[in-house]
Image: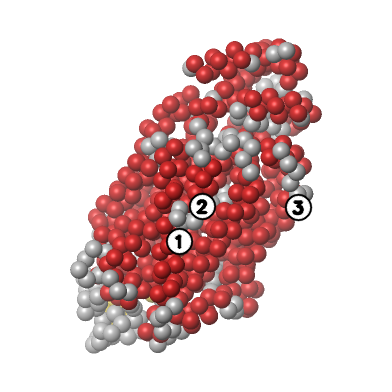
Amino acid sequence: MKEDASEKDKYPGLVNTNKTEMDMNGDAGAAMAEEALDTISHSKERGVWGTKAEFILSCVGFAVGLGNVIRFPYVCYESGGGAFLIPFCVFLVIAGVPMFFLELAIGQFSSSGPITVWKCVPLMGGLGYCVCCICFLLTFYYSVMVAWCIYYLYHSFSSELPWSLCYDDPRCIGVPCNNSQVKSGDGIEVVDCKKQQMSPASLFYFKNLLGVTASIDEIGDFQWHIAVCLFITWLLIFLALIKGIHSLGKVAYFTSVMPYFLLTALLVFALTLEGSLNGIRFYVEPDFNRLSDPLVWKSAASQIFFSFGIGWGCLIAFSSYSKFDNNCLRDAVLVSILDCATSIFAGFVIFAIMGFMAHQQGSSVAEAIENTPGLAFVVYPTIVNEIKWPQLWAALFFVMLIIIGCDTLFALVEGVITALCDRFPQELRTKKMYATLVYCLLSLFCGVFLCFGNGLYVYTLFDSFVANINLVVIGILELVLISWVYGADRFIDDINFMLNKQISKVWKWAWAIVSPLSLFLVLVASLIKYKGASVDTLYGEYKYPLWCECIGWSMVVLPFMFIPAVAVSKISSTPGLSLSEKLTKLTKPDTSWGPRNIDDWYRDRENRPELYEKNDRYDEIKESNA
């Protein structure tokens, strides 16, 4: 390509270095040298954010998603309300902000996606593929929740909102329960309606939306309405990403701001309802006995990772498009605080409404609603029923959920596509639109399997395993690799060079000791106390059978198989050295590691030659360009 030729003409020493690599190491060395040249000379093709605001708003849109508005209240409710806020805030400080900053900094310094960024520790290059695999699993099941939002939006235009009606179902609050048993369509006794009273919104969620069956073994009917909404979801994602970050940045101006206006309006109205203060009291008053449960701490750590998007590769991908001297420290602190504040703010909205629901039912807040991942699909519609012009508010609310859900999906898809395009620039970078199309179609196909009557069970299985333990493990690996293998001192020196100012050594101790140790302790304790996955449905609490647990744990373990696989491949392809020498070489940065822009790459080696003297022949390059 034209740009490649101009870079080679501009820096002939780089080509000479590559020739030396070829002479020394044969075919393998030639391949490594060519890859190094391609890595540096393709910087102009990647693109950058149009403005600083586009980057910030895209990060906010990614971080502030359904994880804040839907998943945070669900996990908080599951973990005892106020008791959850303490470990959540603790992990925000000791893990959330440090890891957010780490991922932004390493992506910006190297201008690399989640795969090629691990050229700083080539032996662990498989971690990037592991992240992409988990990202894909997150993408296709997360998109189903956005499809649910689209279905609710469609029904928001009904003359009478369907989730406000009981349809004479005896399980519905306010409908007489003449018979102790409610029978399903095939005549099987399923639930005691005297013991399980539900709100109209709960029944709509379980029956009309999901058509939920009694167990995961019962596949149930195919829910065509969810499949159609899922297709619309992926069409929106593809259209938004058709031009990569250039289109994503423009979309973020609208999608990142609107949710705050609607959440504020809903909170103001919720506080006028009777019983709302009881819900808020449950939310802010901790039960200190719950703090002794390591699962509460594990849930807090997992929610930080899920909400911030740590370990997903998206933050690395986003920051890789930033200017080299962008103040990523300020960005990390700003977005992290905003994300945490949004989660807590959304919690006030949810729990105020739950207090009202508990008052209606004559129950405690802890017993007011079924604890499901779709908790918000029950709580928010309930408050909408009480507002004047409910159709308008319902439409606005579900548009908001669709927007913030799509924001997260934008980031997940862009993160994987960026990683693949950086890893295979010759094959994919000029065909990025087609790569995005294939990814969207594949995700749509996989998501269809969640459109059956047992879809809620499958969804919860993914949510219980994919978005929990493995994200914490990835976080620990990232911290250990950067702090102890690549070197925390060197990484801080990289950041100082990039930002042209000195950052505090506190970050070194956070990355090297505090964050990984706290995450490791929570991981071990949660594994010891693990009790098995479960979900509340129309038929009561459902505990997953052993075969489901095996599938769940396989989704945790299998993505990490990329790490030893790539390590073995790297070791076998490194020529002419003993095993110990190969390991030593592969735990040091690759020849092409450093700033992607070739001017920054040379400036880095000019200012800090001691860091690179063992990894490349900068002196030869310098002399040839003299």
Mark 1 — residue? 260
Q: Residue at x 47, y 74 (%)?
A: 351
Q: Residues within 10 Å of mark 1 (few under 14, many from 20)?
A: few
Q: Earlier in the sequence, mark 1 or mark 2?
A: 2
2 relative position to 233: left or right: right
Residue 528 locus on image (x, y percent)? 62, 65
User: Which-is-in-front pick, marks 1 and 3?
Assistant: 1
Which quadrant holds residue 153?
bottom left
Q: Depth check: 602 or 206 in front? A: 602
Amino acid at circle 3: Val
| Percent of width and height locating residue 487 | 74, 41
Mark 1 residue type:
Tyr
Q: Is residue 621 visible?
A: yes
* Identity of the residue drawn at 67% across and 22% down: 575
In the rendered image, the vertical position of residue 93 relative to residue 388, given as above or below: above
In the drawing, does residue 423 fall left or right of residue 11?
left
User: Residue 4's x, y, as percent?
Assistant: 53, 18
Mark 3 sits on what residue?
506
The kind of residue on which mark 2 rests is Val
